[in-house]
Amino acid sequence: MRIFIGGPETRDLTHTIPGSLTPFVGRAADCAQLLTLLRTPTCRLVSIIGPVGVGKTRLALEAARILRGASAGRFSDGIFAVSLAALTLQHPMDDLFATTIGSVVGLPFSGTDPPVVQLQRYLRSKGLLPVLDNFEHIAPAPAFLTRLLRDAPQLAIVVTSRKALGLQDEWHLPLSGLPCPPQAEHAWKEANEDWSACDLFVQLAPMYAPAWALTPTNALDVARICRLVDGLPLGIELAVSWLAVLSCSEIADELARNLDLLTTNASDPPPRQQSLHALFDSSWDLLNEAERRALRRLAIFRGSFTRDAATTIADVSLPLHSQGAGRHVS
């Protein structure tokens, strides 16, 4: 399951980082923070945490490309992207996980030893950085990562996940939506502020409406659209796709009524990214009953809430609305 950039003549067998088809917008500070962590020898497991469509994979691969283009450093044996989206829970899970990683990093499985033993032996002396994408649905796997890290002192791992893994040595890098102009901001394009949600909209617009241009009038609607989707990159992309048939004002009005507009007929996104409702459903399915009950209670709040409010009004205790184990980076 190797992923290569370019044709066979350009393959680099020590790196498998796919090229990007979308612009990298608004995550410069997050990328710098991730690179700092990955250049710190004591940081060996970083989880990029956030909802579907927030840009976790895009950030992880951008940092990997930068590291690949710099001096080899601690990852002289390679940087690899490993997609876990197609995996399903089965037994023995560790062997399935090991063969998935091993097939990408170049491990020639052979002999009678279990795949997990062969992978541990292969990684023991190597400075590698695998980027494990879509980790959240492989629930039993975190303990497997701990064993790999303890047995391979030069190994570091980046994980993208909708929730923390709950490991003691895990560093958390949480992502939320891109910054949007406040309701009162009427000249966001001229303001010296980071409204990268709007910048992403403007950069994506020509893909769907080549003649579209930003004007003082539609700039207000662009900002409104971005606020309505909370700056979520996937929500922005789904909204932009309607520019072929609707104006910015019409898109904003539809979104204000409901989010049913945020869907796509494109065949290449995975099902969970084809609509905002599918995004919510796939995330809801990952929660246990206690977490679902907590979210139902927290739905009483509009926008943010304090810890005291969650406890006294919604009766949701700290463990259920915290990030879990690990180190929180912000």
Image (tube, rainbow, N blue to C red):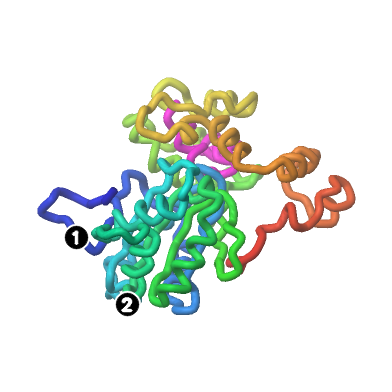
Q: Quadrant of the C terminus?
A: bottom right
Give the residue at x 33% y 72%: 75
Q: Is residue 190 visible?
A: no
Q: Is residue 158 visible?
A: yes
Outermost residue to the top: 245
Q: Is residue 129 magenta?
A: no
Residue 124, quarter of the rendered image:
bottom left
Give the residue at x 36% y 58%: 115
Q: Position of residue 19 (x, y in %)?
A: 28, 50
Q: Position of residue 2 (x, y in %)?
A: 26, 51
- Give the residue number, with chain letter if any, for mark 2: 73
Amino acid identity at mark 1: Asp
73 lies above or below 210: below
Amino acid identity at mark 2: Gly
Distance in Å between CA atoms under marks 1 and 2: 17 Å
Q: Position of residue 73 (x, y in %)?
A: 32, 77
> How many neighbours does mark 2 have within 10 angstroms: few (below 14), some (14-19), or many (20 or more)?
few
Q: Would you say 141 lies left or right of 313 here?
A: left
Q: Would you say 221 lies left or right of 293 here?
A: left
The residue closer to the viewer here, 164 or 21, is 164
Residue 125, quarter of the rendered image:
bottom left
Q: Secondary structure at mark 1?
A: loop
> How many neighbours does mark 1 have within 10 angstroms: few (below 14), some (14-19), or many (20 or more)?
few
Residue 231, quarter of the rendered image:
top right
Q: Position of residue 275 (x, y in %)?
A: 51, 30
Which range of residues does the magenta coloring cover?
219-242
Outermost residue to the right: 312
Report the number of numbered marks: 2
Give the residue at x 50% y 43%: 89
